[in-house]
């Protein structure tokens, strides 16, 4: 083969190979495109199936939800129908039984009246039998010894001990040896009564004035002075948790050791029905005053409001003004009408800096900064009293709301309540008379308290208890709308709980309560004269009867 033929054959072979490669490439491309189209078709089918399944599940879920909702609605409607039927049936039964209950009540009243007349007749017959009340028989009084000449049996009543004949009963009470009912029993000091007996003949009154302020007769020893009403509470499931919070808060303060103080400052607590308020009773008046100064502290995200009860009586000033030395400041500040509470003090301020601020208004008689018991750091609360009582109100107005750094001072009187009727202990009788003639200590409230209407025996029977409740409600509704009423009754565990024998009615309006109080006072109920008075609403909420 010639050279030209060889080259031509070579070119022809190369061209054939190129054509074969092009055919293979076209074949692969067509195959890949077919596979791609088949893959896209399969993926679209799967996506459609997935969407269809999801739509089917949504429809099933909506159908089940609608079915459950309709079933619940039918159940609620059925329950409401049953409740209405039961309520209508009870009302019909009550209306049907009302005449029977009225007849039964009238029968009991007639039985009581008949028993009373029977007792009166029996007494009259007894008098006739003895001849003391019979007009048909002449009385012979010659053999009767006059009562002034009779020899009295030795009973030790109205007989004064030897050496104390000149002591009156009121002076004996002021001595502290015989505390008043409800007052704490102090350590007896017979020397005080003996000194009083010796001074009575000489006409000395200085000791009487000292005894007049005996601790047994001070308002600071009453339960009201040891109580604090806490409101604006969060919803509380565990009452003990809140009590422990307040105990820890007050126990961490370095307090003066006083009689009655314990490890736990709170000794008694009583929550309201809705758990939004609580009445706390402390072991000492100092702890109660500190708790009042803590008003605004946070618990569970709520700022607590802590106030005195409305029947709190402000104690008198017991200091002797002649004993005060100008320039000296007492480290203790007892409760009085001029005691000032200062809260929200920046903790970085020292005691000298606070004193310098307070002295801008006048000389201080006493000052106390509350500090942490363990670290000695300031708690941001202080108490003070000025030597001149005229400065008290001026200092409160000038300091309250003052900005110190990021804090705003809260300054007010520490003891706010009812002022005592008189200022001397020697006129206790006239003091009680003046207080009795004054306005009610509780003020006008929506709570009406009914006294001398019932006895514990009337509350033992359930039917009689409901009858009394219905009678009181029916009579009080004549004066206005009633929210609710409470009649404490004996229980199996406590035969004489607090409040038994009293009836409490809460009206919607104060005017209705006032009208009921004025109208029901002096009325008769089961041959008893009704006594009416207002009752504090905060005590009613927590059942502090």
Image (cartoon, helix red, strand yellow):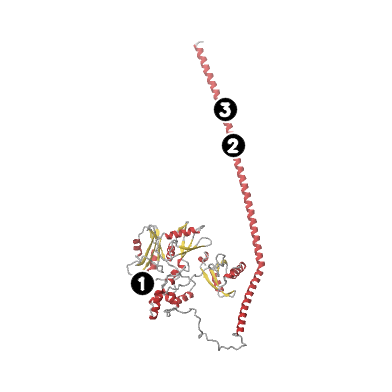
Q: CA distance from mark 1 to mark 2?
A: 100 Å
Q: Which quarter of the picture shows residue 371?
A: bottom left
Is residue 83 shown above or below 209? above
Q: Is residue 545 left or right of residue 426?
A: right
> Which residue bears the numbered disc 2?
46
Q: Position of residue 475 (x, y in %)?
A: 59, 71
Is residue 6 shown above or below 61? above
Number of numbered discs visible in the structure rendering: 3
Judge by depth and name the residue closer to the eye, 376 or 52.
Answer: 376
Which residue lies at the image location 53% right of the left edge and 22% below the top edge? 21
Helix, strand, or loop for circle 2? helix
> Which residue bears the numbered disc 3?
31
Q: Nearer the viewer, mark 2 or mark 3?
A: 2
- Residue 61 visible within the image: yes
Q: Position of residue 374 (x, y in %)?
A: 39, 57
The mark that comes first in sequence, 1 or 3, is: 3
Contact between labelled residues 3 and 2, with CB atoms less than 8 Å apart: no
Judge by depth and name the residue closer to the eye, 179 or 541.
Answer: 179
- Residue 477 visible within the image: no
Q: Position of residue 421 (x, y in %)?
A: 44, 74
Q: Which quarter of the picture shows residue 120?
A: bottom right
Helix, strand, or loop for circle 3? helix
Helix, strand, or loop for circle 1? helix
Q: CA distance from mark 1 to mark 3?
A: 117 Å
Q: Position of residue 325 (x, y in %)?
A: 33, 69
> Which residue bears the numbered disc 1?
321
């Amino acid at each position: 083969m010639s050279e030209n033929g060889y080259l031509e054959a070579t070119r022809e072979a190369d061209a054939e190979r190129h054509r074969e490669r092009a055919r293979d490439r076209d074949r692969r491309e067509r195959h890949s495109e077919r596979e791609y189209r088949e893959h896209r078709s399969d993926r679209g089918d799967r996506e459609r199936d997935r969407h269809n399944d999801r739509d089917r599940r949504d429809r099933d879920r909506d159908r089940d939800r609608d079915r459950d909702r309709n079933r619940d609605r039918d159940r609620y409607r059925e329950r409401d129908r049953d409740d209405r039927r039961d309520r209508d049936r009870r009302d019909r039964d009550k209306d049907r039984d009302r005449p029977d209950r009225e007849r039964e009540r009238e029968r009991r009243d007639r039985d009581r009246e008949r028993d009373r007349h029977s007792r009166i007749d029996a007494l009259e017959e007894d008098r006739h039998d003895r001849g003391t009340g019979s007009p048909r028989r002449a009385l012979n009084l010659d053999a009767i010894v006059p009562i002034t000449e009779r020899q009295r049996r030795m009973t030790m009543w109205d007989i004064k001990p030897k050496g104390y004949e000149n002591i009156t009963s009121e002076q004996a009470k002021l001595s502290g040896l015989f505390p008043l009912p409800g007052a704490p029993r102090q350590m007896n000091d017979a020397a005080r009564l003996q000194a009083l007996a010796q001074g009575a003949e000489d006409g000395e009154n200085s000791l009487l004035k000292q005894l007049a302020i005996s601790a047994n007769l001070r308002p600071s020893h009453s339960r009201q002075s040891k109580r604090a009403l806490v409101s604006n509470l969060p919803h509380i499931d565990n009452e003990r948790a809140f009590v422990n919070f307040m105990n820890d808060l007050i126990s961490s303060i370095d307090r003066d050791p006083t009689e009655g103080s314990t490890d736990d400052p709170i000794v008694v607590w009583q929550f309201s029905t809705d758990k939004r308020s609580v009445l706390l009773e402390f072991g000492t008046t100092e702890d109660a005053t500190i708790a009042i100064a803590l008003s605004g502290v946070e618990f569970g995200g709520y700022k607590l409001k802590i106030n005195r009860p409305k029947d709190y009586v402000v104690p008198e000033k017991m200091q002797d003004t002649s004993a005060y030395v100008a320039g000296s400041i007492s480290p203790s500040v007892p409760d009085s009408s001029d005691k000032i509470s200062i809260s929200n003090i920046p903790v970085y301020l020292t005691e000298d800096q606070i004193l310098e601020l307070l002295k801008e208004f006048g000389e201080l008689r006493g000052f106390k900064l509350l500090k942490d018991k363990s670290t000695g750091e300031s708690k941001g609360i202080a108490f003070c009293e000025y030597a001149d009582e005229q400065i008290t109100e001026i200092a409160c107005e000038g300091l309250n709301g003052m900005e110190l750094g990021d804090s705003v001072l809260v300054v007010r009187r520490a003891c706010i309540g009812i002022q005592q009727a008189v200022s001397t202990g020697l006129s206790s009788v006239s003091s009680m008379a003046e207080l009795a003639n004054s306005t009610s200590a509780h003020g006008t409230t929506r709570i009406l308290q009914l006294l001398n209407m019932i006895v514990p025996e009337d509350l033992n029977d359930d039917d009689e208890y409901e009858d009394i409740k219905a009678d009181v409600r029916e009579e009080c509704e004549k004066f206005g709308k009633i929210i609710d009423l409470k009649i404490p009754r004996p229980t199996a565990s406590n035969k004489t709980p607090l409040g038994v024998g009293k009836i409490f009615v809460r009206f919607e309006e104060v005017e209705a309560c006032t009208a009921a109080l004025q109208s029901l006072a002096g009325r008769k109920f089961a041959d008893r004269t009704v006594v009416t008075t207002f009752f504090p609403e905060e005590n009613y909420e927590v059942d502090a009867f």
